[in-house]
Amino acid sequence: MAKPLYVHIKEDLPTLKSCLKKQPPHLKSRIQMLILLKKSAIPLSKMDLAMQLGVDPDTAQRWRRSYVDGGLEKLLAFNRSGNAKPLIKEHIKKEIEKKLNNPKEGFKSYKELHEWIKENYLPAIHYQTVHKYVQRTFGAKLK
């Protein structure tokens, strides 16, 4: 079995604790890992870190490696973003809004709206996509 990797934590405990308070929930475990490493008198293995933090051992190892490679800045870098292009384009959105705001020609159900979009604009769109989009974008509650 390999020896645990020793990581020298440059920041002091008060700095880490104040940084912990400022982080969003998905980054707090990373700072907690640094606090555990700083408080520990002996180097902690990835298994020990994983058990104490409640994460996968490979995740603990990846966090530890990113701290060693780039410090606190690289550890807290969270580069996930939504790259998916919107399926419902702006001109379709305006048409839906126009239809939803028109009481005489409006939709009575999500199914009716879904069929209208399929016929006129996007033949391959799923019902659930339309349902969630209309709820999220317009706050509509069709029956």
Image (cartoon, helix red, strand yellow):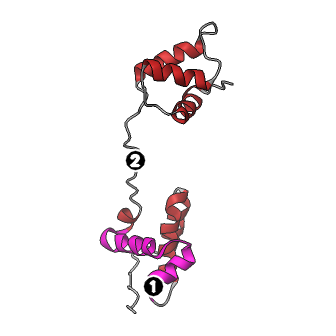
Would residue 2 appear left or right of 12 to someone viewing this image? left
In the figure, residue 112 lies in which quadrant? top right
Q: CA distance from mark 1 to mark 2?
A: 31 Å
Q: Residue at x 41, y 19 (%)?
A: 91
* Disc 2: which residue: 81
Numbered disc 1: secondary structure: loop
- Percent position (x, y) of residue 96? 51, 18
What amino acid type is highlighted by mark number 1? Ser
Magenta run includes residue 53: yes
Which residue is outermost to the top?
104
Q: Residue at x 65, y 18 (%)?
A: 108
Query: Residue at position x 55%, y 73% from top?
Result: 53
Residue range in magenta is 43-71
Q: What amino acid is found at the position of numbered circle 2 in the picture?
A: Ser
The residue that appears at 69% across and 25% down in the rendered structure is: 143
Precedes in sequence: disc 1 or disc 2: 1
**Residue, far left:** 69
Q: Which residue is under mark 1? A: 45
